[in-house]
Amino acid sequence: MPSVLPASASVAAEEAPPGSGAAEDLFLTLAAAFTAPPARMSASDWSLPLAADLEELGAALGLDTAAAARTLRALAAERGTDEPWLIDYSRLFLVPPVPITLNTGMYLEGSIGGSSAQMLQQCYGTAGFAMQESFRDLPDHVAVQLEFIAALLQRAEAGDDVALDMAREFIDAFIVHWVEPLHAACGRAAVPDPAARVYACLVDVLRQATEPTFL
């Protein structure tokens, strides 16, 4: 787990020991979900493994992932294997003018590539975390931030006494400030484009995972 691997967002600069937990898996799973899927992956091939992962993680972590799993399974039933999911992903997140941005600087300061992206890059560097050179996006991309949290949780599992505190501080400093605007953007986009409902449900799971009592 996760079944849908991140296509490329980021990696820890130093390899962490094995022994990740369910919370780490959740953040990795969500990071993968907000990364562009492989070009030929169908809606059902993308959504069904993700639904299964979220159900398992929800049970392990005490999170309500049922609505997200139902929405993902409904997507698979409606769309099947006829059309690559990348078409929907691109329409929502990549092709201008995008109805939803995954660069969170737009939610934090109304622009892309500003001070928040620089602050995020500094956080990554301080923690020994680096984006892969192949990843063609900015440090404020949702997937990068979620993989960063997962890397910190993996370090905490391996016995790093400060990694969990770093994860909590990062969530409080950044993620809690953009998760609600992102959820609202997904909700607005879902009015003309039902594909956005899937991402609204995923953000709802993320909202639960960023509650102060979760970590």
Image: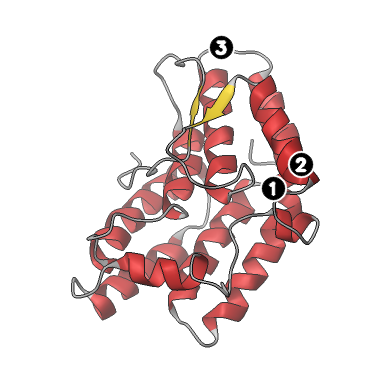
x, y percent for residue 69? 39, 63
Disc 1 designates what residue?
Answer: 175
Labels 2 and 3: the sequence-earlier one: 3
Q: Is residue 48 left or right of residue 6?
A: left
Q: Residue at x 40, y 55 (%)?
A: 36
Image-based side of 41 in relation to 145, left or right: left
Near-viewer residue (215 or 119): 119
Task: Residue 89: name its quadrant.
Answer: bottom left
Q: Position of residue 133 (x, y in %)?
A: 46, 33
Looking at the rendered structure, the kind of residue marked 1 is Ile
Relative to 12, residue 113 above or below = below
Judging by the rendered image, the residue that carries numbered circle 3 is 159
Q: Secondary structure at mark 1?
A: helix
Q: Give 17 or 84, whichever is nearer the viewer.
A: 84
Q: How many numbered circles does the render carry?
A: 3
Q: Nearer the viewer, residue 85 or 211?
A: 85
Toward the left, the furthest residue is 81
Residue located at (38% from left, 53% from top): 55
Q: Earlier in the sequence, mark 3 or mark 1?
A: 3
Q: Is residue 124 visible?
A: yes
Q: Nearer the viewer, residue 60 or 117?
A: 117
Measured in 3D between alpha carbons, the distance from the residue under mark 2 to the one under mark 1, in whole angstroms, is 6 Å
| Residue 206 rendering spot, x and y as whole percentages | 58, 53
* Label 1 environment density (alpha carbons within 10 Å; few <14, some 14–19, many ≥20): many
Image quadrant occupied by the N terminus: top left
Instruction: Find out whether the residues at labels 2 and 1 contact each other: C-beta distance under 8 Å.
Output: yes
Which image quadrant for residue 8?
top left
- Residue linked to disc 2: 172
